[in-house]
Amino acid sequence: MADAEGFTVKLARSSKEIFVPRGGSILFALMDAGISVPFSCGGGICGSCEQEVLSGIPEHRDFVLSDEERESNTSMMICCSGSKTEVIELNI
Ligand code: FES
């Protein structure tokens, strides 16, 4: 499980690591770090912020993915979802 304070997002293509505080948004943490990623609604309903998950287990909080897609742990909506693992690696 991610620790009480948050989790780390590893960005595979840019070799960066971004810390996301517990309850915080991966999307906003990336934007704060100057990394630009597509998004629209910011609330888990449009699907535009979907990113491929390379390792780690997302804590899905969106309204876009099906149950099968959630269980596959291969993608996530980074505006609203978190991580169940201390580190989650995205294909960014
Ligand atoms: S920005 Fe719409 S689901 Fe994330």
Image (tube, rainbow, N blue to C red):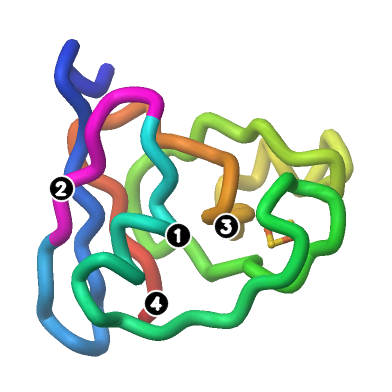
**Quarter of the image that includes the N terminus:** top left
Closer to the N terminus: mark 4 or mark 2? 2
Provide the residue span drawn in magenta: 18-23
> Does dot 4 land on a helix, a strand or a loop?
loop
On the image, numbered disc 4 is attached to which residue? 91
**Residue 22 belongs to the span the image colors magenta:** yes
Between the C-alphas of marks 1 and 3, the distance is 17 Å
Q: Which mark is first along the chain, 1 or 4?
A: 1
The residues tagged by marks 2 and 3 sit, at their Cα atoms, a distance apart of 20 Å
Name the residue: 21% across, 35% down: 7
Relative to 80, does residue 18 appear above or below in the rendering?
below
Q: Is the magenta stretch mostly helix, strand or loop?
A: strand
What residue would you read off at disc 3?
A: 74
Quadrant where the image shows the C terminus: bottom left
The CA distance from mark 4 to mark 2 is: 16 Å
Write down the residue under mark 2.
Answer: 19
**Nearer to us: label 2 or label 3:** 2
Near mark 3 (Cα within 10 A), the count class, few <14, some 14-19 or many ≥20, is some
Q: Is mark 1 on a helix, strand or loop?
A: helix
Residue 69 x, y percent position in the rendering: 76, 48
Residue 21: image x %, image y %?
A: 23, 33
What residue is shown with label 1? 27
* Disc 4 Cβ-to-ligand 1 distance below 8 Å: no
- Which residue shows up at 29% across the image and 24% down it? 22
